[in-house]
Amino acid sequence: MPMSPRDQEVDAVFSPSQMPCAECGESVVRVAVHSHACDPSRRLDFQMLAMRRGVLAFDSELREYLSGKEGRFETWLAAREVRRSA
C-alpha cells in the first residue's frame, strides 16, 4: 500500500537519513553504518567528552582520598619506597 504524503512526512521526521556513530559521534548515513570506520582521534575526543564529569571530578576525589587516613598512609608509604630506592 503506497504511503500518503502525510505518512511520508512523518516517516521523514522520525527516520533521519543520518545517525551518530555510537563509538565516535560522527554523523553516518544510515545505509553506510556497517561500512563506517571511526577516525581514532575523533573516537578519543568523543570518549573523553563522554567521560568529562569523571575527569573533572578526579582531582577533587584524589585530594579528598589523600587527606584521609588511608591516603595519608599511602602517601607515607610511597615516600618511604622512594627514599629506599634512592
Image (tube, rainbow, N blue to C red):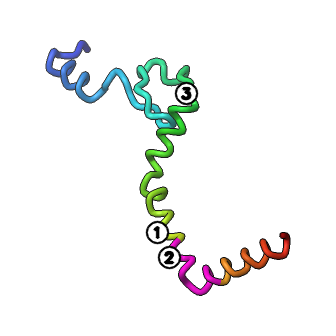
Name the residue at the bottom extreme: 69
Reading the image, the residue beneath label 2 is 64
Q: Is residue 60 above or below residue 35?
A: below
Reading the image, the residue beneath label 1 is 60
- Residue type, mark 1 in image: Ser
Q: Do callouts 1 and 2 mark residues in contact (Cβ within 8 Å)?
A: yes
- Residue type, mark 3 in image: Asp
Give me the residue at 50% from left, 32% from top: 42
Residue range corresponding to the magenta coloring: 63-72
The spot of residue 20 in percent (x, y) is 41, 31
Give me the residue at 55% from left, 27% from top: 39
Name the residue at the right extreme: 85
Q: Earlier in the sequence, mark 3 or mark 1?
A: 3
Q: Is residue 49 above or below residue 42?
A: below
Distance from the alpha carbon under mark 3 to that under mark 1: 32 Å
Total numbered circles: 3
Q: Which image quarter is the C terminus in?
A: bottom right
Task: Judge from the rendering whether residue 54 lies leftward or rightward of residue 78; answer left or right.
Answer: left
Residue 39 is labelled as: 3
Q: Does the magenta portion include 67?
A: yes
Distance from the alpha carbon under mark 1 to that under mark 2: 6 Å
- Residue type, mark 2 in image: Glu
Mark 1 residue crowding within 10 angstroms, few (<14) / some (14–19) / many (20+)? few
The spot of residue 61 in percent (x, y) is 49, 70
**Front one among 81 and 45:** 81
Name the residue at the left extreme: 6
**Front one among 11 and 22:** 22
